[in-house]
């Protein structure tokens, strides 16, 4: 459904712009051009159009004047194309995969992977169906049915198109691998066995550095680089987080990767990660978890049931601490959180030219605080931006790794799934509760220049092209501009 807004037709003309052809746009960098964007935009400000779409969390893929999105409706995956100028639906295709398995996280919805396009091909990835390639008009080109990976958190990784190659990560699947296909016909060119990498959700990233093009992707405890032509390994940085959900970013000389996960969290990091959306924890509660137990045990019966837990990651993952499966946490379960998995929550800055085991030789600097869980790092105007669940923003100098500011609190303390975008001297980021922030990208302090509130959560990363912001909420696609 296309909702009318009070604009004359001539005001909808699209300004000249580049495409935003994959997750996080050109080069996977989440950086737009310098064209000015509206200083303020939201449900009631600078709306050009709004179109109802099938529910999903995939980010907008923009190519050739069209927006490509995926959704899930009545047990079917849906691929949709919208006109960039008007928001009009141009076509939709439906695909029926195998039934979805049980999920352990309420935000693990289907239709999360973002499509990739190159002007002639548009490729969608549906977790219990596989890969589907169509032309921009929706004409089928080829399909590659793939087994349901069976990930309990669903599928978060998106396909990558580069120079005629289609790359897909299948970490955690029974045939765990990085797969490379010829985008013209879907024929397999090479695969990288990843059977020992566990479940991960970051997307493949092509690092166009000053020496060569490299395929870089995180996995359990490791950040790996591969040759794009053959899939042969180039280098590895070891000892990283156990369950990465983020994607790297880079410039011509340095690649930046930051990831945090609960299995590697200890002490304050664990308890803050568990309750940061709703509680401020005292030093005493962090050092003596039984004090926190007593605060949560509202009726004083020595047990904590889900209704006594505020909205938080701990509530989302309640069964993980309920080791005896009785529907409650007792003092023993709460006081002995799971033992940390191998590896550590860490950000690394990797120098170009790395070879082999680069853990010691090629890491320029590291950072340990305020790391993101799902929201990928943003490199913009010489700074690296990190957004941690619970509303903690950190800004680092990209060359030195020193903090411009760290762990500054934003007002919305929910989950931060959207990856930030840099545009026109601003940083755009949003939350699972629907709060949109626009931040000053050059200030030495956290400076919020605009906020807006949406009725739905913000999970998808926006596309910013031609001075316009294209933002997807779960059931609507929005276009904002002057």
Image: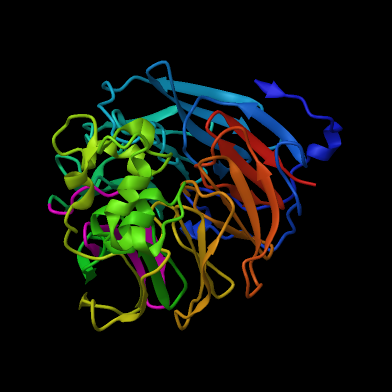
Q: In the image, 99: left or right of 58? A: left
What residue is drawn where x is 48% and y is 49%? 416
Q: Point out residue 77 in the picture as x, y percentages from the top left corner.
A: 40, 24
What residue is drawn where x is 61% and y is 32%? 455
Instruction: Report the label total.
Output: 0
Quadrant occupied by the N terminus: top right
Q: Is residue 135 above or below residue 236?
A: above
For the rendered model, the colour scheme is rainbow
Q: Which residues are magenta?
A: 196-222
- Residue located farthest toward the front when viewing the structure as drawn: 300
Q: In the image, 118: left or right of 344? A: right
Q: Is residue 74 above or below residue 23?
A: above
Q: Is residue 268 above or below residue 55?
A: below
**435 or 308, which lies in front?**
308
Q: Point out residue 33 in the picture as x, y percentages from the top left corner.
A: 65, 61
**412 or 148, which lies in front?**
412
Q: Is residue 204 magenta?
A: yes
Q: In the image, 53: left or right of 243? A: right
What residue is drawn where x is 54% and y is 37%? 457
Residue 45, picture quadrant: top right
Examine the rendering and report whether any part of residue 66 can be seen: yes
Q: Is residue 130 magenta?
A: no
Q: Point out residue 446 in the picture as x, y percentages from the top left corner.
A: 62, 67
**148 or 436, which lies in front?**
436
Examine the rendering and report whether any part of residue 203 can be seen: no
What residue is drawn where x is 66% and y is 55%? 438
- Residue located farthest toward the top when viewing the structure as drawn: 74
Q: In the image, 92: left or right of 35? A: left
Residue 51, picture quadrant: top right
Q: Point out residue 234 in the picture as x, y percentages from the top left corner.
A: 23, 70
């Amino acid at each position: 459904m296309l909702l009318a807004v009070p604009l004359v037709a001539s005001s909808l003309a699209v300004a000249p712009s580049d495409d935003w052809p994959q997750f996080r746009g050109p080069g996977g960098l989440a950086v737009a051009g310098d064209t000015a964007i509206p200083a303020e935009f939201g449900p009631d400000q600078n709306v050009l159009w709004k179109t109802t779409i099938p529910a999903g969390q995939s980010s907008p893929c923009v190519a050739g004047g069209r927006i490509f999105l995926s959704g899930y409706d009545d047990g079917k995956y849906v691929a949709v194309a919208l006109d960039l100028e008007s928001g009009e639906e141009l076509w939709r295709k439906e695909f029926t995969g195998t039934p979805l398995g049980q999920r352990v996280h309420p935000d693990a919805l289907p239709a999360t992977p973002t499509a990739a396009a190159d002007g002639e091909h548009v490729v969608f990835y549906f977790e219990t169906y596989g890969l589907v390639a169509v032309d921009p008009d929706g004409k089928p080109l080829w399909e590659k049915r793939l087994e349901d990976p069976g990930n309990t958190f669903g599928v978060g990784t998106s396909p990558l198109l580069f120079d005629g190659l289609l790359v897909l990560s299948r970490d955690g699947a029974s045939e765990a691998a990085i797969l490379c296909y010829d985008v013209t016909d879907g024929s397999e060119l090479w695969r990288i066995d990843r059977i020992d990498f566990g479940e991960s959700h970051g997307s493949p990233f092509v690092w166009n550095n000053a020496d060569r093009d490299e395929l870089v992707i995180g996995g359990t405890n490791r950040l790996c680089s591969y040759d794009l032509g053959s899939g042969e390994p180039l280098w590895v940085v070891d000892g990283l987080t156990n369950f990465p959900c983020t994607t790297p970013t880079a410039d011509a000389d340095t690649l930046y990767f930051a990831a945090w996960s609960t299995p590697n969290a200890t002490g304050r990091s664990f308890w803050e990660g568990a309750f940061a959306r709703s509680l401020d924890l005292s030093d005493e509660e962090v050092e003596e978890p039984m004090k926190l137990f007593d605060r949560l045990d509202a009726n004083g019966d020595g047990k904590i049931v889900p209704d006594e837990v505020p909205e938080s990651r701990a509530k989302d993952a309640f069964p993980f601490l309920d080791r005896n499966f009785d529907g409650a946490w007792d003092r023993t379960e709460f006081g002995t959180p799971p033992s940390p998995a191998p590896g550590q929550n860490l950000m690394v800055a990797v120098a170009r030219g790395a070879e082999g085991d680069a853990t010691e030789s090629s890491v320029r600097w590291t950072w340990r605080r305020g790391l993101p869980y799902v929201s990928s790092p943003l490199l913009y105007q010489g700074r690296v931006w990190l957004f941690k669940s619970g509303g903690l923003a950190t800004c680092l100098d990209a060359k030195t790794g020193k903090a411009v500011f760290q762990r500054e609190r934003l007002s919305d303390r929910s989950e931060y799934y959207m990856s930030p975008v840099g545009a026109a001297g601003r940083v755009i980021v949003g939350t699972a509760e629907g709060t949109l922030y626009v931040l000053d990208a050059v200030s030495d302090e956290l400076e919020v220049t605009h906020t807006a509130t949406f009725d739905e959560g913000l999970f998808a990363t926006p596309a910013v092209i031609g001075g316009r912001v294209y933002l997807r909420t779960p059931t609507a696609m929005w276009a904002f501009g002057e």
